[in-house]
Image (cartoon, helix red, strand yellow):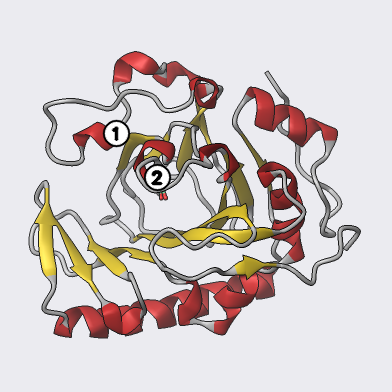
Amino acid sequence: MTKHTATTDQAPQGLTPAERKAWAEDGFFFRPSLFGPSEQDAFRTAAEMVVKRAEACVSVSSDHYEIDGNEYVEVPALGEGATVQLEHAPESRTIRVIEPFHGLHPIFDQLVDDPRIVLPVRELVGTEQVALFSDKMNLKRPREGSRFDWHQDSPYWAHFCEHLNQLPNVMITLDDADEENGCFRVVRGSHKKGCLPGRSGDGTLGPLFTHPDHFDEADQVLLRVPAGSLVFFSPHTVHGSRPNHSDRARRALVLTYQPAGLRMFKVDRVRNAGAAVAADA
Ligand SMILES: O=C(O)CCC(=O)C(=O)O
């Protein structure tokens, strides 16, 4: 088991030997408080602006549908391929997920190119240059934010592309996260067997949730990390989170990268990332 330690040097840097080992053995690692208080404030303000805009678009969209009792809204007014998920409580109009979101505020578009993300991600993808694959904003509102059942991202993307081993995720936390507000959880070492079987007889999306016989919940790690932290995790890592039972928000952004020159998952366009970032930035 790899010891996960705080990164003391906050300057942009590639992977440390400990992070490389953690990626291989555990399927994740984190860098706490990489973004400082003023950057965190700017991200939170921008996120709420994006949410306001999304709420307005959702209220006039005619493309609402349900999957397994949960409501989704296609929102072309937010950009090509934009989907909003609403909270799971019946009749709730609270936004749960916005995907993609990076084009909805300049600060998030710049974040995709941030050397503090791009430098380690290049090593995880294994190419000199990288592009964005997908991006989503997860909003767990106080007392209302719902759970994310255990799943891997790779089976979800397997129908779309073959470079599943080159799709590292980076979560950027916007709030301090702990057990009470539904912090992110990963199952240590679960990435090692590639795509695992899904649940059966459990609704339309059941097959996308990992079958409990194929991982051990006892291996879960709670990412109790402060706002402004980065959590890097493999697309094969089983992950999820519990509901937000607190009076505090638990918001996070998830960016997924891939080799440069490839189109995004939901948008038929290439968004290369950090091309100007020097390897020794
Ligand atoms: O934000 C979370 O707690 C879970 C996120 C997640 O599982 C996902 O976006 O795929």
Viewer-nearest residue: 277 or 220:
277
Residue 38 lies, in percent from the top left, at 67, 75
Quadrant housing residue 78: bottom left
Instruction: Indicate the secondary structure of the residue bearing disc 2.
Output: helix
Q: Nearer the viewer, mark 1 or mark 2?
A: 2
Image quarter of residue 212: top left
Q: Position of residue 200 (x, y in %)?
A: 17, 25
Where residue 52 sits: x, y (%)?
A: 33, 82
Amino acid of disc 1: Phe
Query: Which residue is at the front of the view, 49 or 214?
Result: 214
Q: Amino acid at mark 2?
A: Trp
| Residue 157, disc | 2
Look at mark 1 in the image and give the residue it sits on: 209
Q: Which mark is residue 33?
A: none
Q: Position of residue 150 (x, y in %)?
A: 35, 33
Whether label 1 lies within 8 Å of ligand 1 gets the answer no
Rendered view: 64 above or below 215? below
